[in-house]
Image (cartoon, grey):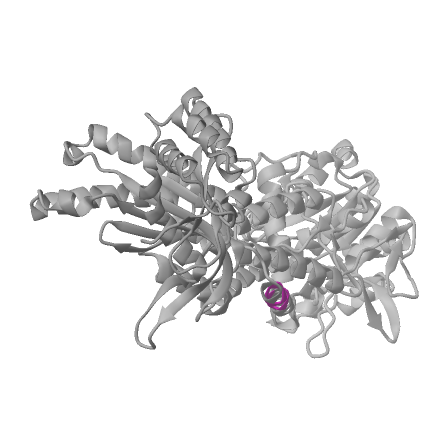
């Protein structure tokens, strides 16, 4: 996981603000409606709605295809249906309906027809045809059970016939709908201004009469009906909640009801309409169809109501992207009565939520690889969608498309930002070190966020020098092919170990290896890793000598020198060609310690600086204090035996005897020192060396200014 810096955090915030601002801006306000559509579809698909249509407070009386195909309506113009409509409405009212609303408008009467018919116009010959219908309207209007519909328009208003207006005493309400910019109905107006006064919409009027209350508009413009403050994201509108996708509203065929009137079955009207709000409207395939929030899920033109007189049609209800307009008004009535309208978040809250979502994904895209960021976006979007559907069950609509799209845009922009700017250094580092640095070391460097400075920087490192002993004489006995095979196997094995301990191989010089620990990647444990690598390299060479065919008969041995301290590391060289390497006295001392191994007959020698940085991780044997060529100051040198507690009994015995001898040596007790070194001289070359030196000084004591420092003349 990539670490986020201050620059990255600022970029993530700016990208989230930009994405959030764009996707909640007015030009993209249709996304808010799309969220409603998706939530409606997901709720219907995942959760559904099991409400019994019989419990619906509103029902629809449908002038449907069956009505047009059933006598006496078949082949008859709708202006001639008025008397039958009056009869059916009278039976519905007698059945106990609370209020009846018209979603159909009869703007003319057959009595007004000027078509010639014999010696007089048809209308004159039909005088009195609408009398019973108008009487039925007057009776229902006077009882407060009837509301006719009209369409308000400055250009082409659509109102009922003048005689109907007089019959209901202008008891008429608007059927206008609120259409979004994408021609989808998701919200409905609550009131209209008529002659400077607010007048409730048709659905609001019907719900108010059913509840026995009047709608009130508060100081903030919010409509209150019977204690229910109608939520309005868009002022003076109600957001439709199609909880049952239209199936929760029963629809009765007008043809069947007219036959039921002929049959005289009053009980049916009571069972079907008692206590209900009734909407008279059309359900036809190509007339008054509306796109709503159900357009993605598919809606239903109601649930077929029970039948009274005619057999039920054979056709079954199918989902459609559009629904009959009467069900839009029916949904509003039900939402108001059941206090179940959708509550949408206001613009500030939608913007904040969208920004937060985009910011989370922007940060994820900054920390993770592109594929991981996409997975994070998918996971977060899925979780958020599930939560949004969960709260939509309770009629609260969270923005869905805006956060999802804004966060996706933030993901794309942050990925582009990283590619162009933020990851430029990382790509440079990977390209620069890919061929000569272990992948895990490169990953460590990238994760640390610290790139090596071009031109060099001071770093505390541990240098590792190794060289094969007497290799020149061995090489003389081998063919070039055998030599290359041997060296490739040896160098590969040693390099794998070095890189496996976070080391960096600086160069190969023939059979020699120059490596450093602690650069280019930061490694607080570079001294411990260097010592472990040296011990493992020594053990690995023993395995190769014992088991690899290329090493058979050669008995290769090597020397390793370790030293820790400050060094300049970086890209060093000419303007045209440079290498990532290291320079300092720390490097020179490590090189000298590698060569000093041969004087003591050992394989690994480390400086006291390296020992100090390893703590108590290893068991050591102090060898001597030496002054290497080219350096005036003496340094103490040590041999690593094993991890602390892992040394063998023989190693411990030799180390103890050697320590005793070294103490006597430094105290000028040369005879005692010789005896102590002599205990292990047969098996330990370093003890043998000191025994010989101690006996010589015991026989010929040094001057008083003698110091126990071994001066090495060679490299």
| Residue 287 visible in the snapshot | no
Q: Is residue 694 above or below residue 711?
A: above
Which of the 4 quarters of the picture holds residue 354? bottom right
In the foreground, 442 or 509: 509
Find out whether residue 12 is within the magenta segment: yes
Percent coordinates x, y for residue 89 in the rendering: 77, 48
Find out whether residue 382 is within the magenta segment: no
In the foreground, 226 or 588: 588
Percent coordinates x, y for residue 713 in the rendering: 34, 54
Q: Does residue 180 appear left or right of residue 671 in this picture?
A: right
Q: Does residue 147 appear left or right of residue 364 in this picture?
A: right
Q: Which residues are magenta?
A: 9-15
- Would you say the magenta stretch is mainly helix, strand or loop? helix
Percent coordinates x, y for residue 636 in the rendering: 48, 46
Residue displayed at 83% across by 56% down: 205
Percent coordinates x, y for residue 658 in the rendering: 45, 30
In the foreground, 560 or 269: 560
Residue displayed at 28% across by 41% down: 558
Q: Name the residue furthest top.
A: 649
Q: Is residue 151 above or below residue 710?
A: below
Residue displayed at 76% across by 50% down: 341
């Amino acid at each position: 996981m990539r670490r986020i810096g201050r620059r990255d955090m600022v970029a993530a915030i700016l990208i989230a603000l930009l994405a959030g601002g764009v996707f909640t801006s007015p030009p993209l306000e249709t996304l808010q409606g799309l969220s409603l559509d998706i939530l409606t579809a997901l709720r219907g698909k995942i959760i559904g709605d099991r409400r019994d249509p019989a419990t619906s407070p509103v029902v629809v009386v449908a002038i449907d295809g069956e009505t047009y195909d059933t006598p006496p309506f078949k082949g008859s113009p709708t202006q001639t249906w008025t008397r039958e409509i009056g009869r059916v409405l009278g039976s519905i009212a007698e059945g106990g309906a609370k209020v009846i609303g018209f979603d159909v408008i009869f703007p003319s009467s057959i009595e007004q027809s000027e078509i010639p018919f014999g010696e007089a116009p048809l209308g004159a010959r039909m005088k009195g045809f609408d009398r019973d219908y108008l009487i039925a309207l007057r009776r229902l209007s006077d009882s407060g059970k009837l509301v006719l519909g009209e369409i308000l328009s400055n250009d082409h208003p659509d109102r009922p016939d003048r005689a109907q207006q007089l019959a209901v005493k202008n008891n008429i309400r608007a059927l206008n709908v609120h259409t979004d910019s994408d021609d989808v109905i998701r919200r409905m107006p609550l009131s209209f201004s008529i002659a400077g006064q607010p007048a409730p919409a048709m659905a609001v009027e019907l719900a108010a009469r059913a509840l026995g209350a009047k709608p009130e508009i508060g100081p903030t413009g919010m409509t209150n009906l019977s204690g229910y403050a109608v939520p309005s994201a868009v002022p003076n509108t109600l957001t439709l909640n199609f909880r049952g996708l239209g199936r929760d509203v029963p629809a009765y065929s007008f043809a069947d009801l007219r036959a039921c009137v002929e049959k005289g079955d009053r009980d049916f009207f009571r069972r079907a309409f008692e206590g209900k709000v009734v909407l008279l409207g059309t359900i036809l395939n190509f007339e008054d169809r509306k796109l709503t929030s159900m357009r993605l899920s598919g809606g239903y033109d109601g649930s077929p109501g029970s039948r009274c007189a005619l057999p039920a049609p054979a056709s079954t209800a199918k989902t459609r992207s559009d629904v009959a307009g009467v069900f839009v008004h029916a949904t509003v009535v039900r939402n108001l009565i059941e206090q179940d309208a959708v509550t949408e978040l206001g613009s500030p809250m939608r913007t904040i939520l969208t920004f937060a979502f985009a910011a989370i994904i922007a940060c994820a895209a900054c920390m993770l690889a592109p594929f991981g960021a996409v997975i994070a976006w998918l996971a977060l979007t899925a979780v958020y969608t599930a939560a949004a559907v969960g709260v939509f069950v309770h009629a609260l609509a969270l923005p869905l498309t805006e956060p999802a799209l804004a966060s996706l845009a933030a993901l794309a922009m942050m990925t582009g930002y990283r590619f162009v700017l933020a990851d430029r250094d990382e790509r440079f580092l990977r390209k620069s070190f890919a061929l000569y640095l272990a992948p895990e070391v490169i990953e460590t460097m990238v994760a640390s966020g610290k790139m090596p400075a071009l031109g060099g920087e001071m770093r505390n490192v541990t240098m590792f020098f190794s060289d094969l002993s007497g290799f020149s004489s061995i090489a003389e006995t081998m063919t070039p092919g055998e030599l290359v095979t041997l060296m490739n196997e040896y160098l590969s094995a040693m390099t794998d170990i070095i890189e496996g301990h976070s080391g960096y191989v600086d160069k190969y010089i023939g059979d020699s290896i120059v490596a450093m620990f602690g650069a280019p990647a930061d490694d607080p444990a570079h001294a411990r890793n260097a010592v472990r690598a040296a011990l493992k390299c020594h053990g690995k060479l023993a395995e190769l000598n014992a088991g690899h065919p290329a090493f058979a008969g050669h008995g290769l041995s090597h020397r390793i020198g370790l030293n820790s301290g400050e060094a300049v590391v970086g890209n060093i060289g000419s303007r045209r060609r440079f290498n990532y390497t290291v320079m300092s006295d720390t490097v020179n001392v490590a090189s000298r310690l590698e060569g000093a191994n041969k004087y003591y007959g050992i394989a690994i020698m480390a400086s006291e600086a390296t020992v100090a940085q390893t703590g108590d991780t290893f068991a050591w044997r102090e060898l001597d204090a030496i002054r290497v060529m080219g350096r005036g100051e003496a340094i103490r040198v040590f041999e690593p035996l094993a991890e602390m507690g892992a040394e063998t009994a023989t190693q411990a015995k030799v180390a103890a005897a050697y320590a005793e001898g070294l103490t006597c040596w430094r105290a000028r007790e040369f005879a005692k020192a010789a005896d102590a070194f002599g205990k292990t001289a047969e098996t330990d070359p370093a003890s043998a060396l000191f025994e010989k030196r101690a006996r010589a000084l015991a026989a010929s004591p040094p001057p008083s200014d003698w110091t126990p420092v071994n001066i090495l003349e060679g490299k």
